């Protein structure tokens, strides 16, 4: 998945009201960017951080920049746009490059299922069970090399785990897929101290037959692509 326009570097001044970020461009201009991330962004929104913005000239958009990346300054990046994982994964599913899913020829995003829920992807193919795939964007890292989810309490996330458990009980393939939008992590774990209820729901879903898959990403200011599996240490 390539960014639609060339990203420009900036310095973060502050993030506020969840979806707004004041930034300084290299020429000294101050701009406000849209932050497409409702989470806490723990460790990723400190004033002075080097970030990358995507400009736009869409007259329908009030803000002319979108915050896309945090630049850690050592060749590593974190993607902060929570819409990116589904876009990158859709391209990978359709190209049949996601490990364990090459038998699925039909990719149907945002399908209704369960109790007033929508699954991120319903995958279908010949001679394979339907696969219900829920995707979570992972950006938290509190230990070197370890990515964690969630970065704040998520009742919605716990609900999704319950819905997946129901699909598994009905004989479908149910997958909780964590996509790590960081290039500096090789392992994944649950942040049970941040949301114990989510960890409990995860344990129940696993017991019910829900599979866990964690994939990494390759991130540059040009785009984001899905890479190989990361170790899950739960």
Image: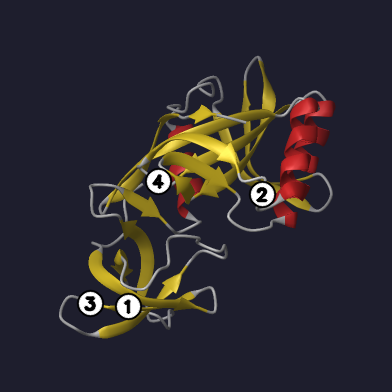
Q: Are marks 3 and 1 in contact (CB under 8 Å)?
A: yes
In the rendered image, which quarter contains the C terminus?
A: top right
Mark 2, mark 1: which one is toward the viewer?
2
- Residue shown at 74%/48% (left/top)? 196
Rate crowding at label 2 as few (under 14), some (14 to 19) or many (20 or more) other CA atoms within 10 Å.
Answer: few
The mark nearer the N terminus, 4 or 2, is 4
Cα gap from disc 4 to disc 3, whole angstroms: 23 Å
Cα gap from disc 2 to disc 3, whole angstroms: 37 Å
Q: Position of residue 1 (x, y in %)?
A: 36, 46
The mark nearer the N terminus, 4 or 3, is 3
State the SS at label 4. loop
Q: Nearer the viewer, residue 97 or 77?
A: 77
Q: Are marks 4 and 1 in contact (CB under 8 Å)?
A: no
Rate crowding at label 1 as few (under 14), some (14 to 19) or many (20 or more) other CA atoms within 10 Å.
Answer: many
Cα gap from disc 4 to disc 2, whole angstroms: 21 Å
Cα gap from disc 2 to disc 1, whole angstroms: 32 Å
- Residue shown at 55%/64% (left/top)? 40
| In the rendered image, the vertical position of residue 80 relative to residue 55, given as above or below | above
Rate crowding at label 3 as few (under 14), some (14 to 19) or many (20 or more) other CA atoms within 10 Å.
Answer: some
Q: Is residue 6 found left or right of 169 in the rendered image? A: left
Q: Position of residue 229 (x, y in %)?
A: 46, 28
Q: Nearer the viewer, residue 31 or 140?
A: 140
The residue carrying mark 4 is 182
The image quadrant of residue 39 is bottom right
State the SS at label 1. strand
The mark nearer the N terminus, 2 or 1, is 1
The residue carrying mark 1 is 23
State the SS at label 2. loop
Rate crowding at label 4 as few (under 14), some (14 to 19) or many (20 or more) other CA atoms within 10 Å.
Answer: many
Q: Position of residue 22 (x, y in %)?
A: 37, 80
The residue carrying mark 2 is 193
């Amino acid at each position: 998945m390539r960014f639609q326009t060339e990203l420009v570097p900036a310095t973060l001044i502050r993030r506020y009201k969840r979806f707004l970020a004041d930034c300084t461009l290299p020429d000294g201009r101050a701009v406000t960017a849209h932050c497409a991330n409702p989470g806490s962004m723990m460790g990723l929104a400190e004033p002075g951080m080097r970030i990358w913005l995507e400009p736009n000239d869409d007259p329908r958009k009030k803000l002319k920049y979108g915050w896309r990346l945090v630049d850690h300054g050592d060749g590593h990046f974190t993607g902060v746009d929570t819409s990116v994982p589904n876009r990158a994964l859709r391209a990978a599913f359709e190209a049949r490059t996601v490990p364990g899913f090459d038998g699925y020829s039909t990719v149907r995003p945002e399908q209704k299922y369960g109790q007033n829920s929508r699954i991120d992807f319903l995958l279908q193919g010949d001679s394979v069970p339907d696969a219900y795939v829920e995707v979570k964007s992972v950006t938290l890292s509190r230990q070197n090399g370890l990515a964690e989810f969630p970065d704040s309490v998520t009742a919605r996330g716990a609900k999704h785990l319950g819905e997946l458990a129901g699909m598994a009980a009905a004989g479908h393939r149910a997958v909780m897929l964590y996509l790590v939008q960081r290039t500096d992590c090789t392992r994944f774990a649950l942040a049970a101290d941040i949301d114990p209820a989510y960890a409990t729901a995860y344990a129940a879903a696993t017991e019910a037959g829900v599979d866990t898959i964690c994939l990494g990403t390759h991130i540059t200011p040009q785009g984001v692509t899905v890479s190989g599996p990361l170790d899950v240490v739960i």
